[in-house]
Structures are given as C-alpha cells and as structure tokens.
C-alpha cells in the first residue's frame, strides 16, 4: 500500500509541475500520468457522491441510534427461512416420537432421521449467524464510516459504493440470494456492473490509525515538494 501511495503522490505532484521538458519520453510520461490522475479523480468523484449520501443519513441519527438493522426484505427472508427450518425439525421429531417402533436406536432408519435433524439444527445456527453478521456489518458501517480510509476507497471504489447501497438503511439497493452451498449473497449494480458480496465479506474495509495517516501524509508531501522543485 505504501508503494501505491508513493506512486499516486508522485503522479499528482508531477501533474502540477511548473517546468517543461521537450523530450518525447517526458511527453509520454506526462500523458500516462495525466490519464492516471484523471482516473483517480474520477474514482474520487464517485466515492465522494456515495460518501455524501452516507454521511447525510448518519448525521440525522441520534448519538445512540435505536434502529432495526435488518431491513424489511431481510427480515421477511430470515423469518420465512427460520420458520421453515423449525417446522421441518418439528415434523421429524414428531415422526421419531410417534413412530418410535420404526426408528429404534441402532437401525439405519434411526441414524438417517437423527442425521437429518442434526443437519437442520446446523442450518438453523448458520442462519442465525448470518443475521448476526449482517446486523454487525450494518452497525459497524454506521459507527466506522467517518474513519474509512480514503486510500482504501480509491482502490476499492466499486466495493465502497456497493457497500453503501447494501448497508445504508435509507439507501438500500440490493438483492439477496443464496449460492449453491446455501450461503447468503447480497448483489447490487455499480455503473452497470454486478457486484456480489457474501455476508462474511461485508464488514471488510480499512481504517487508518493516526500514526499511519501521518506516514501517508509524509509520502504525499515529499512527492509534491519534489515535483515543484523539478
């Protein structure tokens, strides 16, 4: 990351230089740097737009927001799935009790039905964990958004915008589905491109502590000073 920051700082500084060298290689470098700086500025514009919407929502929240962190679609999905799993578990337990003559311990029938019950119990626990992780990601987004690294946003612009569309309570724009393994996937569209994020990948953004910010600023200041001096 430090190397990327140094390159980025040098590019910005070079683009602002006050001298002019007429060699073809310098022109080629200038053209390349201009394109790169333009790309970074475009990314920053997209990021700023998403960040402004997020912060506008956060600014309206009380200090300790009492909000339901699962939106209506997710509440409906989880409620339906959990009720279905519980119903299947109840049916199999009733079958095991009512027809105990068919499911004597040690028989294949007993092994099969108890394994099915254990599998449903595991799925129930997984669904609960997904709901908890989703709520935690939403809570952390609200709490940590002001401290998300600007550098991380630049190099992960699509993901940042996707997360803002998935985690902001007033800007929800995503669909929920499950992959072939039954894992919950949240999908949204950013500039015409589909972005899929698993629940356990949601809470995955970088925050920079003050000492690291100081070091990053040193790189930018050094690159900018070198560019001005030619």
Image (cartoon, helix red, strand yellow):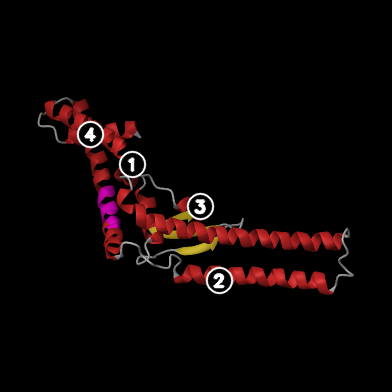
Q: Name the residue under label 4.
A: 220
Under circle 3, the secondary element is: helix
Secondary structure mostly taken by the magenta-highlighted segment of the chain = helix
Image height check: is 153 above or below 94?
above
Span highlighted in magenta in the image: 43-51
Mark positioned earlier in the residue sequence (2 or 4):
2
Determine whether, in the image, residue 193 is placed left or right of residue 44. right
Disc 3 to disc 2, C-alpha distance: 20 Å
Q: Which residue is drawn at 49% across and 67% down?
A: 74
Give yes or no for contact between labels 4 and 3 (Cβ–Cβ under 8 Å).
no
Front residue (pair 120, 155)? 120
Residue 21 appearing in the image: no
In the picture as drawn, the residue positioned furthest to the bottom comes out as: 98
Q: Which residue ends up furthest to the front in the rendered image?
A: 64
Mark 3 or mark 4, which is nearer the start of the sequence? 3
Residue 140 is a magenta residue: no
Q: Position of residue 107 (x, y in %)?
A: 88, 60
The reply to whether the magenta stretch includes residue 44 is yes
Q: What residue is shown with label 3?
A: 200
- Give SS at disc 4: helix
Location of mark 2 (residue): 79
Q: Of the numbered discs in the image, which one, if any, rests on residue 208?
A: 1
Q: Distance between the Cα atoms at labels 2 and 1?
A: 37 Å
For marks 1 and 3 on the same chain, the one whose residue lies earlier in the sequence = 3
């Amino acid at each position: 990351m430090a190397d990327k920051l140094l390159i980025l700082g040098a590019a910005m500084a070079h683009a602002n230089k006050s001298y002019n060298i007429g060699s073809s290689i310098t022109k080629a470098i200038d053209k390349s740097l201009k394109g790169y700086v333009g790309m970074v500025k475009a990314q920053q514009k997209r990021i700023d737009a998403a960040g402004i919407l997020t912060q506008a929502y956060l600014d309206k929240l009380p200090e300790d927001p009492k909000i339901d962190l699962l939106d209506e679609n997710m509440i409906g999905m989880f409620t339906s799935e959990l009720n279905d799993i519980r119903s299947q578990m109840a049916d199999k337990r009733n079958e095991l009790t009512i027809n105990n003559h068919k499911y004597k311990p040690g028989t294949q029938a007993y092994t099969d039905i108890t394994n099915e019950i254990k599998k449903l119990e595991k799925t129930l626990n997984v669904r609960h964990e997904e709901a908890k992780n989703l709520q935690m990601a939403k809570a952390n987004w609200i709490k940590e958004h002001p401290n998300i690294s600007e550098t991380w946003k630049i190099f992960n612009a699509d993901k940042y915008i996707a997360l803002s569309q998935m985690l902001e309570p007033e800007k929800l724009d995503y669909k929920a589905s499950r992959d072939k393994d039954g894992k919950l996937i949240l999908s949204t569209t950013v500039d015409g491109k589909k972005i899929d994020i698993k629940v356990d990948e949601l809470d995955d953004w970088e925050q920079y502590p003050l000492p690291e910010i100081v070091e990053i600023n040193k790189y930018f200041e050094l690159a900018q000073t070198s560019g001005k001096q030619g």
